[in-house]
Amino acid sequence: MTQLITHELVELDQNLGNTPEDVIRHLATRVAASGRATEVEGLFADAFAREQKTATGVPGGIAIPHCRSTAVTEPTLAMARLSQPVDFGAKDGPADLIFFIAAPEGADQEHLSLLSKLARSLIRKDFRSALRAASSPADIVDLVDGALADKPAVHTAAAAATPNVASAAKGPKRLVAVTACPTGIAHTYMAADSLVAAAKEIGVDLQVETQGSSGAKPLDPAVIAAADAVIFAVDVDVRGKERFAGMPVINAPVKRGIDEPEKMVHEALAAAENPNAHRVPHFGAEEQAENAAAEQGEHIGQKLKKALLTGVSYMIPFVAGGGLLIALGFLMAGYDITGFADKILAENNLGNLPTEYPELAWGPLGAYLGAVFFKIGALSLGFLVPALAGYIAYAIADRPGIAPGFVAGAVAGYMGAGFLGGIVGGLLAGYIAHQIGRLNVARWLRGLMPVVIIPLVASIVASGLMFLILGGPIAGITTGLNDWLSGLTGASAIVLGIILGLMMCFDLGGPVNKVAYSFAVAGLGAATITNQAPWQIMAAVMAAGMVPPLAMALATVLDKARFSLAERENGKAAWLLGASFISEGAIPFAAADPLRVIPASMLGGAVTGAISMAAGVGSKAPHGGVFVFFAIDNFLMFVVAIAVGTIITALSVLALKRWAVKKSVDTVEQVPVTV
């Protein structure tokens, strides 16, 4: 096995810059110079992207930037002792000891285990003191090799798997914990050691399961059964969470397990004594979104946004598939299929069309297949409101919220409350199901709660409220809104196109974007030959949503010097993403430079929406971009609107980058988006 660190990878008492990106870039350059990485920029981009997700500074003046990267050829550790400390986000101040961990995508378990062991050694004061006192790179290498050779002193799942009988005799509280981070190399193990050390200081028996890259040994079921509470210090989903069902739980990001281990232990002890504490749910492996949000201090607006985005994300497949099938039905059988589909399918005879059915170039077979496609699509679109409501409720109450949410959504559809009714019904069902699920019921009743009691009671209450109180007023609002939209012509339609274009480009797939999109697709079912306003709104929304990624792709071609290497790679992918109506293709650019990219995108999107509405462009498909050309009326003007908006946004963002520059674009790299 190759040595993880050599003296060429150590730099002592140097000033490497003022920011984490300066230090990371310098160490990435050193790793590449040693022949352990194929390129500097790719390694830096991966490491800095990881740093932007969660700061890697930890107490004690330590920072451990790390990543997995295809640019790395062998597991490597680079170290710098800074003469001028740099702030890596630790609560106790800047870091002067920087360990840069670079692992290849396919790193073997032995190497990953050693890298994890080093991370755990860094919480020891004596080890940190020795690193600061070392006089040469060779001394650093010896210290690191010595730390890697020693056996770790941590009470994880790999330690004794049975409860401490001696401690039990004195009656201390027992806790278990799970630590995990996205990379699974450093924070996972440092959080485990910090929690164990903090628990030991106050006389608490704590067993930890580390779910890291070097493998995980599950906690013994007997240890879990004997524990009074569980701590989840994680940035990813806990594997096998159902093992902890019913236990009081403390949720936090993995970094808090390093920064505030004492507080987390005390919070877990308090939760063990509190009958109303949050608990790991009995109904599935995923914790309720509400619990996680509450533990991390999210306010009500963030919770509502998360629930809405969850509902829309699950709704989109019903809409996209159904809308495209309806468009294919129109293509094969004409618009008259809306009035004849049921009759054609009832006859179930390819050659026996209704006598009043118009002649088609594709003949009876085309009409029959068109009826099949149209009917399947219409049935799929019929799930739009129930699916939206069902998965909004799921985001709030987990699995027990799905059935009440679907029922409330179906009631909203039955009463004509539409998209707005689905949102209200889903929120009601989710909140009621969540509140019922928090009741502390007898053990024999717990098994019935998620499958019988919660769905039954929540469905009755939420749907009853929709029937008796809320459904009628919401239906009236929906009808009035649809009538107003159907009557829009001329300047008012253009203004609507501008508003929709601004919303689609404001947050590139975020809640504002999703509200505009959901508003458009919710109206497709009401579109007819005499009422084409919903089709026109859909076309404006889709065209505007295509502008940001296409514009960023064009901008990287027009002026490469204004963009980093990673952004230019993103630009290549953005051509296809934009053509497919995937607004998220512009997110890497917006994340790197939001104050220039977002306003420029909104300007182009507004122009595109206005042109589309003014030209009467209509789209019968809710998704697909230029690839559903057959479902777009006035396709030429659809393309013209997109092209004009794309050019405006590209030129605007280049102008802003040229004349509103605060720092070089090369100071920020992003991970390339792949298709």
Image (tube, helix red, strand yellow):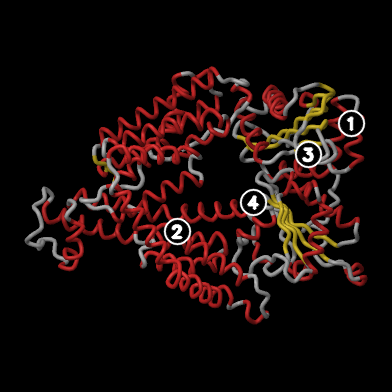
Residue 227 seen in render: no
For label 3, the crowd category at 10 Å Cα-Cα, with few meaning under 14, some 14 to 19 and many 20 or more, is many
In the displayed image of the protein, which residue is found farthest to the left?
355
The residue drawn where x is 28% and y is 48% is: 487
N-terminal-most mark, 2 or 1: 1
Q: Nearer the viewer, residue 413 or 108?
A: 413
Mark 3 or 2, closer to the camera: 2
Residue picked out by circle 4: 236
Occupied quadrant, residue 536? top left
Give the Cα distance between marks 3 and 2: 41 Å
Residue picked out by circle 1: 132
- Badge 1 marks a residue whose secondary structure is helix
In the image, what residue type sits under mark 2?
A: Leu
Give the Cα distance between marks 2 and 1: 57 Å
Q: Position of residue 399 (x, y in %)?
A: 54, 66
In the image, what residue type sits under mark 4?
A: Val
- Badge 4 marks a residue whose secondary structure is loop
Occupied quadrant, residue 439? bottom right
- Decide: is 578 above or below 199: above
Give the Cα distance between marks 4 and 2: 25 Å
